[in-house]
Image (tube, rainbow, N blue to C red):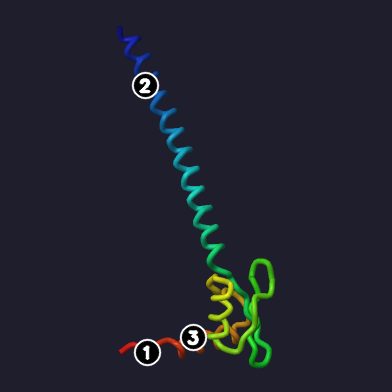
Amino acid sequence: MWGEFVQTFFIILGVFFLFELVLHHTVKNQIQDEELKIAQALEDTVVLCRVEQVDDVFYLYDSQSEQFIGQGHTVEDFWNISEQMQKFLMVVDGDKQAIDLLKDMQHARAPQES
């Protein structure tokens, strides 16, 4: 009788661990699928850009493909490019001075808090 109990215990324990392993694998795959969906959605809505400045003209390039995105003199020019592409432009790399100047232009454009 004691031997049957031990045998049943180990069978139940084995089934439990097998169930946990399958559940963990399934959840891990679902998480990876969700992460891929989020990454794809981000890629579909945001272009990560590198900025260069020559004189008073800013040039934007896709930071991953180095494809030319557009050029402009003001933040509004880049808003127009963003609307035409139907994607957000996010400057993540480039000439520090150009990035700082664009930030200053953006802050000057933003409504002031009361």
Residue 12 horizontal/vertical position (percent): 37, 21
According to the picture, the residue beneath numbered tag 2 turns out to be: 12
Q: Amino acid at mark 1?
A: Gln
Q: Quadrant of the C terminus?
A: bottom left
Image point (65%, 75%), residue name: 69
Q: Amino acid at mark 2?
A: Ile
Quick one: SS at disc 3?
Answer: helix
According to the picture, the residue beneath numbered tag 3 turns out to be: 106
Q: Residue 112: which disc?
A: 1
Label 3 and label 1: CA atoms lie apart by 12 Å
Image point (53%, 52%), residue name: 36
Label 2 and label 1: CA atoms lie apart by 66 Å
Q: Is residue 102 above or below residue 50?
A: below
Side (left or right) of 85 relative to 21:
right
Q: Amino acid at mark 3?
A: Gln
Residue 85 horizontal/vertical position (percent): 58, 72
Image point (46%, 89%), residue name: 109
Residue 19 horizontal/vertical position (percent): 41, 29
Image point (54%, 70%), residue name: 87
